[in-house]
Image (spheres, helix red, strand yellow):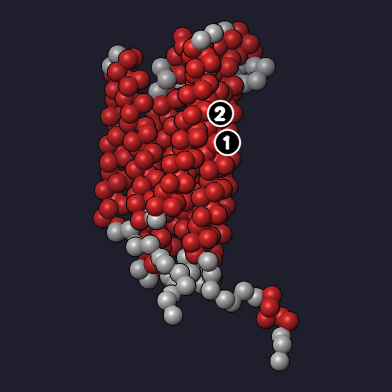
Amino acid sequence: MSKPAAALTHTGPKDYQGAKLGMWIFLFTELLLFGGLFILYSSYRAIYPHDFHEGGRHLNVVLGVVNTVFLLTSSLTVAVSISALRKGNRRLTLQCLGATIVLGILFLANKYIEWSEEIRRGIYPNGPELEKLPNGEKIFYGLYYSMTGLHGLHVLAGVVVLTVMLAFVIKNRVTAADYVKLENAGLYWHLVDVIWIFLLPMLYLAA
Amino acid sequence: MEPAQEHSPISPYQTLVQVWLVLLLLTAILVFVSTKYHEALSVWAMLTLTPLKAGLVFYYFMHLKYEKPFLKTMVLIAIAALLIFIGLTFLDILQR
């Protein structure tokens, strides 16, 4: 007897390696997306070394470093959550995923404080203070907003994806036997961390 | 029949925590060098410590360590492609 409804529910073996490979191929496109911005940054830095130095001097290094600590720690917690799930420690998985989401939100809160400070100083597109700066510094701040903004959107997307994963673990849709969704979400989160690892010295420590 | 799926080993908690501590230490060194020392030294610190940090995240947190040579090669090709683009761009900029 055939049951058409059963055909719609996927119950067969899942292609674990294929799912992971697909995620990695997506991450390569992300790498090239940010890579393009890194090329733009280094090209203009080679043309305007002094202006980039000056631009970096006005950024808040403390907030940049605090955000680095947040992201590095969140990378640890998401990695621990995957190990914990596979070892059958569901409680630790949920705690670590929760911690990762909170750290991601704290990162975005810090970014909000930082951008507000810059905007208050008149540093924003067509802002009164930005207009007075030399061309190289204008480009520096343009790249600063584009790169941290695009990265921030990725953090936001990561927080949403990890929240969905948290719900999946609670509902037993992600389990010790079927964990590839969480693993792929973790891969995405780590890549967002890697991009920030490069943004810290490029923008905040440039001076 | 052999199992349909092969799963990589589970990363031990201890290794993950150690990698995290090394990442924090490298960040501290990077920040210290770039705020206290001469620009040339801080540029070198950036060019060496930053890829090292990214490498640690790729190798341990993203567990490339446990992946098959096929996936490792794919990652290397993607990074090599980016580095070639960066190299070619600089060949252009430096000759203007």
**Front in this rendered view, residue B28 or A9:** A9
User: Residue A194 location, x and y as percent?
Assistant: 44, 39
User: Residue B61 location, x and y as percent?
Assistant: 38, 50
* Above or below, comparing residue A90 to residue A75 in the picture: below
Q: Are marks 2 and 1 in contact (CB under 8 Å)?
A: yes
Crowd tier of the residue under label 2, counting other residues whose Cα lies within 10 Å: few below 14, some 14–19, many 20 or above = some
| Circle 2 residue | A37
Q: Is residue B67 left or right of residue A154?
A: left
Three-letter residue code for mark 1: Leu
Q: Residue at x 33, y 58 (%)?
A: B11
User: Residue A166 location, x and y as percent?
Assistant: 51, 61
Q: Which secondary structure, mark 1?
A: helix
Which disc, if any, is residue A33? 1
* Above or below, comparing residue A179 to residue B16 in the picture: below
**Front in this rendered view, residue A13 or B49:** A13
User: Residue A197 location, x and y as percent?
Assistant: 42, 35
**Front in this rendered view, residue B32 or B48:** B48
Q: Chain of mark 2?
A: A
Q: Residue at x 53, y 60 (%)?
A: A19
